[in-house]
């Protein structure tokens, strides 16, 4: 994997001595982002709500190299203390309830985290304006909701209508409003479906399918298998967030899409996993999924044109690296 990301030596000096605050650090993207920032020489403060022994943050040893703060992103006094005490100049807000089904079953909890957590963090950033150089807020392609045409572009209205989609849209509207009202260097990232080593949420398509294949079982597909999605390797997403932080002063209040721009059906992704693992996969298709949009995929043209962003890992190579990570994970007796 490393060769694709060669030539990073010149990037280290830009981050050495900076202090980054990462919420949602035990999540998939959070763990990879912390690792990316540490590699570049940044000081990292990670907000952790729950102790997750199996998280990528801990399993890769990143947790030992950063300051960890226990608490909730909805706690304004806590967030203000962290920003002031550690001299945070860059904020990456990733903390969220990320599952459509969980948000539907427990909407209040999802709204507390996704909406209240966001405006709490934005308010803390406003009160600490003098030192804050960049705030990157994680939105989602789900915020677009149903659109008459695809791919999603950043000019489209946010039409998310189910609880999860609406919570992400609301958080994003608040972030962009804070940017305009208080001239804060806030920028929003809308990513396609992320995948990569360290994702232990087996309800998700890629980790769930890989686990089933490695254990000699039939993977379970909750949908009809025909839903179309775009994907992005998680380290490319982490690097996109870092790049947004570097560009924040010139793109304040804007949103950017990040994805492979290669829409595939669920069954096509399962077939790709079969090719990578050398396995003929016969999934169990349950057609149980509710409240999910049938077709979602992004255009990343704005990020390409504005600051030359491109993903460095394609789907097949990303899946190979992901499968290798899971082989090692299960080989450790996990």
Image: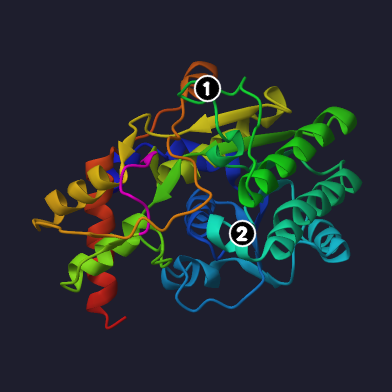
Q: Position of residue 204 (x, y in %)?
A: 40, 59
Among the two numbered marks 2 and 1 on one chain, the one whose residue lies closer to the N terminus: 2
- Location of residue 205 by image quarter: bottom left
Give the residue at x 57% y 29%: 256
From the image, which quarter does the C terminus lie in?
bottom left
Q: Quadrant of residue 143?
A: top right
Tell me residue 323's x, y (percent).
24, 59
**In the image, what residue occupies the spot 33% across and 31% down?**
262
The answer to whether 154 is drawn above or below residue 192 in the figure is above
Magenta span contains residue 225: yes
Predominant secondary structure, magenta span: loop
Q: Seen in the image, is 250 located left or right of residue 296?
A: right
User: Whole-Å distance between the Cαs marked 2 and 1?
Assistant: 24 Å
Camera-side residue of 146 and 1: 146
Q: Please give the label number shown on residue 148.
A: 1
Residue range (magenta) = 222-228
Q: Is residue 136 magenta?
A: no
- The numbered dot on residue 80 is none
Secondary structure beneath dot 1 equals loop
Residues 311 and 139: in front is: 139
Furthest residue in direction top, as rendered: 305
Residue to which mark 2 is pinned: 104
Where, by quadrant of the figure, is residue 78 drawn?
A: bottom right
Report if residue 112 is visible in the image.
yes
Crowding at mark 2 (Cα within 10 Å: few <14, some 14-19, many 20+): some
């Amino acid at each position: 994997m490393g060769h694709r990301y060669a030539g990073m030596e010149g990037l280290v000096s830009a981050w050495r001595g900076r202090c980054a605050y990462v919420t949602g650090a035990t999540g998939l993207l959070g763990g990879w982002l912390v690792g990316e920032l540490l590699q570049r020489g940044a000081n990292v403060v990670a907000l952790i709500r729950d102790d997750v022994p199996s998280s990528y943050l801990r399993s890769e040893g990143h947790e030992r190299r950063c300051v960890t703060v226990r608490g909730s992103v909805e706690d304004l006094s806590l967030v203000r203390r962290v920003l002031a005490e550690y001299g945070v100049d860059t904020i990456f807000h990733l903390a969220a309830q990320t599952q459509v089904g969980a948000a539907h079953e427990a909407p209040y909890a999802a709204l507390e985290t996704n909406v209240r957590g966001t405006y709490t963090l934005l308010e803390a950033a406003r009160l600490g304006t003098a030192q804050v150089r960049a705030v990157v807020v994680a939105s989602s392609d789900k915020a677009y909701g149903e659109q008459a045409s695809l791919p999603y572009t950043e000019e489209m209205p946010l039409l998310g209508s189910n609880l999860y989609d609406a919570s992400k849209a609301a958080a994003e509207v608040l972030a962009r409003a804070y940017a305009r009202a208080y001239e804060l260097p806030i920028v929003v990232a809308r990513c396609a479906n992320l995948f990569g080593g360290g994702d232990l949420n087996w309800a998700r398509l890629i980790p769930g399918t890989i686990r089933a294949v490695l254990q000699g079982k039939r993977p379970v597909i909750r949908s009809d298998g025909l839903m179309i999605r775009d994907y992005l390797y998680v380290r490319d997403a982490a690097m996109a967030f870092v790049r947004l932080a570097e560009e924040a002063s010139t793109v304040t209040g804007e949103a950017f899409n990040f994805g492979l721009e290669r829409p595939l059906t669920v069954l096509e992704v399962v077939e790709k996993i079969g090719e990578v693992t050398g396995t003929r996969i016969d999934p169990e298709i349950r057609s149980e999924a509710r409240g999910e949009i049938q077709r979602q995929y992004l255009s990343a043209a704005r990020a390409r044109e504005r600051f030359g962003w491109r993903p460095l890992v394609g789907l097949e190579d990303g899946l190979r690296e992901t499968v290798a990570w899971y082989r090692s994970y299960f080989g450790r007796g996990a």
